[in-house]
Image: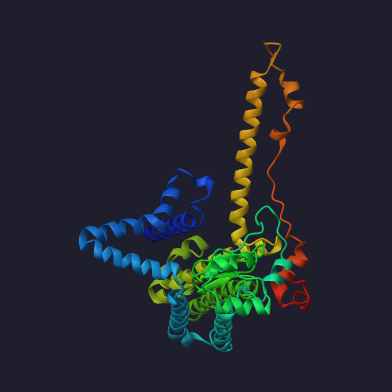
Amino acid sequence: MGLQWALAVHGVITILVVVSFLCGHWPIFQGTFVERIHYFITSGAYDYFLRFVAIVFGSKVRNSFLRIEYYCCDRPNPVLQLLYLGILGGTYYIIAKSSFRYIPGVYVNELHKYTSVLAVGVGVLLFLLTSFSDPGTVNAKNVSQYVSAYPYDNILYVEKECPTCKIPKYCFVLHLIYATLCHLKNLMRVHLQCRPARSKHCGICDRCVARFDHHCGWMNTCIGEKNARYFMAFLLWHALICLYGAIVLGLILAGQLKERKIILILTVYYGIDKSFYSLFPHVVQWLLSAHNTQMLLIVFLTVVSLLLAGFCVYHAQLCLTNTTTNETFKWQEYLDWRRKLNEAKASAAALKAALHTVNGEVKAPESKCRQFFNKSPLQSEVAVKNNVYDKGILRNVLEILVPISERQSFFHRKTF
Ligand SMILES: [Zn+2]
Ligand SMILES: [Zn+2]
């Protein structure tokens, strides 16, 4: 009974921490303890840690931590790439060392020893493709084509040059002059090319990236127009291999239960009732004592698989609507701004109507029915998302699989 309670409490705490971490910032949790746990996990704990370091070790040590944080979070670095390889390699090593001796088993074929190597190999290949392929860097040679390929919607994107890249309009002579006299930036400013719509300057990579999605620390690169397909494949593949690992480990444990006749021992020798609810805690107890490594691995792989699957579904939904992560924030800001503007205009109009006088007399208040039909057009104006880049599911998916800049038509686009 005690074990059941311990497992239930452990499950509730795990779910609470995961939900708080991933969703604690959602408006629905505003002011609740879920939001407080989210704040504590994402920044509060680190702030307390820095304060603790400053008090105990002094401000010099605290500044060293801040410098490390700047290097790890704001500069390109391979820390998370190495951590990914460490986690992947470490997990595979632990699985091979602890569980390969049970293969082949009652439910697991010898083949899984080799398919697991293949699965991890493909995972590493997708990681390398995402990390080291060009995300779609905008430069002087392709900027005109990109500007032509992605029109400005004049909502999220207006014609604007990148103040950091200062990409010149491409022309061989001009480019030569620019390269030679790049220190004369003020002189060249009149010839700068506008940043293509949907691109963004990444402060960490220090470059403009076409169809910018986000900067991924795990990949140490931006996710953009050209590598979004590898990134999606990476997420999907890793969600599947984690699930695959958890299922194979589960089958190994099921095989062990059968081989060692645990159910028979529990029911015949210990006299435990042959029902699921009676046997379950005893089976779990045996598994935790005899196969604790496999049990921990199953929990770890299942949690990681669910997180990756959630992230993959989120990105798939963005792909289907031809929106980037960067644009979801921009749309949120735009719609909030429009909503507030409409509310302000509506209240101003209502105030004006209330104070309106005819020949010095205050206008008689309108009936509720009349108010409804005479509603100000501003009040009924609803801020809606008008995504001009959404061309239908098939073309949106095709844009991810075959990026615009890799199509023949891209190179024949008018340069200006
Ligand atoms: Zn830039
Ligand atoms: Zn970047």
Q: Quadrant of the C terminus?
A: bottom right
The reply to whether residue 14 is in sight is yes
Residue 57 figure quarter: bottom left
**Vertical arrangement, residue 141 with respect to residue 113, above or below:** above
Determine the residue positioned at 45% across, 49% down: 35
Q: From the top left corner, tell me how far across and down residue 121 is, in percent.
A: 56, 85
Residue 113 figure quarter: bottom right
Q: Is residue 259 left or right of residue 366?
A: left
The reply to whether residue 305 is in sight is no
Q: Nearer the viewer, residue 258 or 48?
A: 48
Q: From the top left corner, tell me how far across and down residue 261 is, in percent.
A: 48, 78
Q: From the top left corner, tell me how far across and down residue 144 is, in percent.
A: 70, 70
Determine the residue positioned at 40% across, 74% down: 292
**Vertical arrangement, residue 295 with respect to residue 159, above or below:** below
Q: Is residue 201 left or right of residue 297?
A: right
Determine the residue positioned at 64% across, 43% down: 338
Q: Nearer the viewer, residue 216 or 149?
A: 149
Q: Nearer the viewer, residue 71 or 400?
A: 71
Residue 153 figure quarter: bottom right
Q: Quadrant of the N terminus?
A: bottom left
What is the total number of numbered labels drawn onto the structure image? 0
Determine the residue positioned at 77% across, 67% down: 395
Display colour scheme: rainbow
